[in-house]
Image: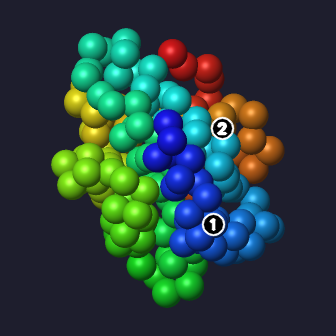
Amino acid sequence: MERVNRIWIHPVYQEALRKLTTYEAEREFCRHTPEHFLDVARLTYLLALENGVAADREVIYAAGLLHDMGRYLQYENGTPHDEASVMLAGPILQDCGFSEDESAEVLNLIGSHRTKSDAADLPGLFYRADKLSRNCFLCPAQADCNWPEEKKNLEIKV
């Protein structure tokens, strides 16, 4: 997981995280925090194991850390955060030693993480993990959340 730790300490990543944390400091709803990023990675990896999907753990964790990093650009200029995250992640992946093929897989997971999918392939599992990572049943702002009811996790799911 050395390359994943390189992502974590990468200056572009840390600056994006700092900006995102600042923008979401007063956010009432789910924040995009390192805990969320790691929850998405861990859930994706577990789902891949449970579904017999061959997946590289470092690729999954890289995608988990990077999938929402462009969200600060959505706050700043309206760029959809999945597109902004792909744009920012490419050079970071290269700097951190990911191959072209690995980078392409990470960028695909990031770029498609908002596209609803029930498929049992890695992008479908990543999408599902992103949604499962939210514990709506514990959220004090649940009633005011703009997520559709069918997206909310109102009970513990496995």
N-term-proximal mark, 2 vs 1: 1
Question: Can you give x and y, in whole percent of width and height, for residue 62 in the image?
Answer: 44, 47
Residue at 28% x, 33% y is 122
Which residue was labeled with disc 1?
14
Return the mark for residue 141. Answer: none
Type of the residue with mark 1: Gln
Q: Is residue 121 above or below residue 24?
A: above
Task: Say whether residue 145 is visible.
Answer: no
Residue at 46% x, 46% y is 3
Residue at 37% x, 16% y is 49
Q: Gap in Å between the C-alphas at discs 2 and 1?
A: 27 Å
Left or right, 111 with respect to 6, comes to left
Type of the residue with mark 2: Cys
Residue at 58% x, 36% y is 39
**Label 1: how many Cα within 10 Å (few below 14, some 14–19, many 20+):** some
- Which residue is nearer to you in this view: 25 or 107? 107
**Label 2: how many Cα within 10 Å (few below 14, some 14–19, many 20+):** many
Return the mark for residue 136. Answer: 2
Dividing the picture into quadrants, the one containing residue 126 is top left
Query: At numbered mark 2, what does the secondary structure look like: helix, strand or loop?
Result: helix
Task: Say whether residue 134 is visible.
Answer: yes
Left or right, 102 with respect to 4, comes to left
Question: Can you give x and y, in whole percent of width and height, for residue 100 in the image?
Answer: 21, 55
